[in-house]
Amino acid sequence: MNRSAPRSIDQYLRQLREDLAGEDPALIQDALYDAEEYLRAEVAAHPEKAEADILEIIASTYGAPDEVAAAYRDTEIKVKAAMTTPVHTGRILVPGCRHVDGPANLVDAALSVLDVAVGNRVLRHRRRRALDQYLADLLAARRRGSATGISSWSRSRARARQPAVAGHNLGAALPVRCRRAAAHPVDARLSRDGAIACTVREGTIGGASVAGPWRDAAGSRDFGWSKSRLRLRRRRELAASSHSSK
Amino acid sequence: MDDSNARKFQKDLNGGLVSLVLLAVLDRSAEDLYGYEIAKRLASAHDGAPIFKEGTIYPVLRALSAGGLLTSRIVPSYSGPPRRYYRITEQGRAVLAAWKTIWQSTRGFVDRFIE
């Protein structure tokens, strides 16, 4: 494409948009946003220079529009390949798992429950019993010190397509896009109130994306379990344990 | 070696190094930094032609943030659009420590052959 070097910020942004034509709108928006931030900061940092003069040297510092567009495309490809297309981050509190200890176990437990949580947003009321049973099984298995057999459930892409969790079939309640969702834990730890707090990345499989109100302003979101519900559950457990010990 | 070969080699090298450098810069910083600030810190640390264009760090910052290695917050700016400030996370620090070890080991290995 034969075109002149941009002489203004607007021209630069227009050329960058042209070079990114056909890409994901979110990627284009990110690239334009970042470029504008840089260019306006550069212009503000050199009030003695004309905008056209600054734009002349931008190609050698920030990069020409086609170079910058290529950088965004390359990074997008690498991220997709390395992280199975992470599109959202979420944060999940896993109730009833406070007896689980050790980082590996935390991740395993959180990973398993997370898969349920992916669908939990759309889980029909009658299916919640399956989720509760799943959590009870998980907790019981951990108390026995035995492997739950659940922890590897979502680690392979093929198995992540299966909507059943620990024998409890949740799939019928989930739309296809959720069945295809795979969740990747990136951090798991005990929260202050003793539940597992797990920061997760939601990915996609087979090109299907998972839409939903996952991303809030802070980039994380507690979904599925409110603190009051956790407290209620804990009180019930304590009451049950004290009752059985009498 | 002509320029295109040199540029391609540099680009291949930069693939992972930009992420490593960005994590290191944010790890050393006591405050959150936005893209332009980071770019200028990198530029001032190197004499001569830049190792990588400043425009290439922005998508990497976003990728690191999407991967949970950085967190970001947006702050209004007088000079243009709101600025996105980045901070390294605990997970980012752990990853940085691992990458540093890999980098030092790799550098030592390569140096044995080229020095």
Image (cartoon, rainbow, N blue to C red):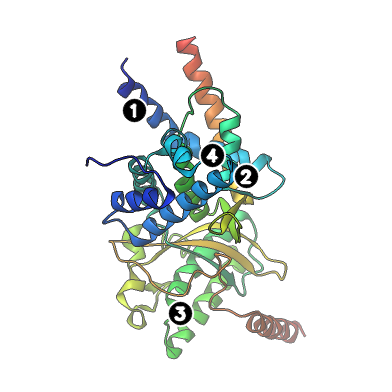
Residue at mark 1 shares a chain with residue at mark 2: yes
Rendered-image quadrant of the N terminus of chain A: top left
Residue at mark 3 shares a chain with residue at mark 1: no
Quarter holding residue A222: bottom right
Which residue in the structure is indicated by mark 1?
Answer: B8
Quarter holding residue B77: bottom right
**In the figure, A163 relative to A51: above or below?**
below
**In terms of depth relative to the viewer, which is nearer, A5 or A77?**
A5
What's the chain of the residue with tag 1? B
Of marks 4 and 2, the one in the foreground: 4
Say what amino acid the circle numbered 4 marks: Lys
Residue A212 as seen in the image, left or right of residue A175: right
| Inter-mark Cα distance, 4 to 2 | 40 Å
**In the figure, A101 relative to A119: above or below?**
above
Residue A228 as seen in the image, left or right of residue A138: right
Quarter holding residue A103: bottom right
The secondary structure type at the circle numbered 4 is: loop
| Inter-mark Cα distance, 1 to 2 | 30 Å
At 61% from the left and 80% from the top, the residue drawn is: A226
Q: Earlier in the sequence, mark 1 or mark 2?
A: 1
Which residue in the structure is indicated by mark 4?
Answer: A49
Which residue in the structure is indicated by mark 3?
Answer: A121
Residue B93: numbered disc:
2
Place of residue A88 in the rendered image (x, y in percent of width and height, measured from the top left): 46, 64
